[in-house]
Amino acid sequence: MSNERSELPENAAEFAELNDDVFGRIASRYDLLCDLFSFGIHRLWKRRVAQRIADEEWSTLLDGATGTGDIILKLLPQITKQNRHITAADISEKMLGVAQQRFGVRANNVKLLKLDAERMSSIEDESIDAYSISLALKICNRQLVLKEALRVLRPGGRLIVLEASNIRWPFLQNAYLSYMSICMPLLGWLATSGDASAYKYLLKGIREFPSAENLAIEMSNLGFENIEFERLSLGIVAIHIARKP
Ligand SMILES: C[S@@+](CC[C@H](N)C(=O)[O-])C[C@H]1O[C@@H](n2cnc3c(N)ncnc32)[C@H](O)[C@@H]1O
């Protein structure tokens, strides 16, 4: 089946949900996989990005590709202001189902929405103060996602992105990629009873994703300004924060 989105070059993992519902299949094991693939370090990254999101000025936040709601779960205890409204959106109903279960009674404070981050037609222009997306830009067409973020953000609104990045020392980056090439298939195979898709996409996404500097340039070319980034764990991932003019 041909899919227009899978042919666009900016999808680092060449992932298309319409062709492969991998997240639907692994939804109940997704959090375990994150722990295995990152040896638990993703919790530190997510805690940090949740802190960065909480520190920004906003009353409406949209977390795109929210998955099982990990970022929102870490964000909720940090939110002290009462007038903050959060929408957690994802293209996979199964991932959203897990998020809803995990939120429990706290789900009252969060609106869950099935939404394609590449085409958010149900979200009005300039209606959101902050847009976050974590560990998903590499499996989406990032140009489309970033353009949509720009459209829905109000002027002055903030974009916050957590994504795979690059270790600045090439020998360490190569060692990390070699290690992941061996480790990820093995752990992924064990945790998913042989379903190769999840780690195939993630590994390709990590390899092909632009450096922190180049992602900042892409954001700037699309029209974001005041772009800053923070490398975490030597640069294995980075948090980018940008402002809509
Ligand atoms: C690697 S998970 C990241 C989940 C979560 N943000 C986290 O940090 O744990 C990627 C998520 O992106 C979602 N996704 C993939 N393509 C999408 C799209 N086009 N629009 C919205 N969500 C998408 C998947 O369903 C999955 O839940």
Image (tube, rainbow, N blue to C red):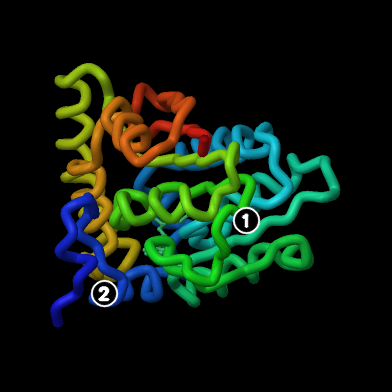
Residue bearing mark 2:
20
| SS category of the residue bearing label 1 | loop
In this rendered view, identify the residue nearer to me: 89 or 130.
Answer: 130
Image position, residue 234 (x, y; %):
36, 22
49 horizontally vs 21: left or right: right
Which mark, by number, is residue 148? none
- Asked if one can make out residue 187 in the rendered structure from this viewpoint, the answer is no
> Hey, what amino acid is under mark 2?
Asp
Quarter-of-image position of residue 105: bottom right
Image position, residue 157 (x, y; %):
59, 41
Question: Farthest residue in the right direction?
Answer: 82
**In the depicted structure, whether residue 25 falls above or below residue 186:** below
Residue at image point 27% right, 24% down: 167
Which mark, by number, is residue 127? 1
> How many marks are shown on the rendered structure?
2
**Crowding at mark 1 (Cα within 10 Å: few <14, some 14-19, many 20+):** some
**Crowding at mark 2 (Cα within 10 Å: few <14, some 14-19, many 20+):** few
| SS category of the residue bearing label 2 | loop
Residue at image point 31% right, 50% down: 143
Image position, residue 72 (x, y; %):
63, 52
242 horizontally vs 238: left or right: right
Residue at image point 32% right, 50% down: 142
**In the depicted structure, whether residue 101 falls above or below residue 232:** below
Q: Earlier in the sequence, mark 2 or mark 1?
A: 2
Distance of label 2 from label 1 (alpha carbons) = 31 Å
- The image quadrant where one finds the N terminus is bottom left
Looking at the rendered image, the disc whose residue lies closer to the viewer, 2 or 1, is 1
**In the depicted structure, whether residue 118 falls above or below residue 214:** below
In this rendered view, identify the residue nearer to me: 192 or 117.
Answer: 117
In this rendered view, identify the residue nearer to me: 122 or 89.
Answer: 122
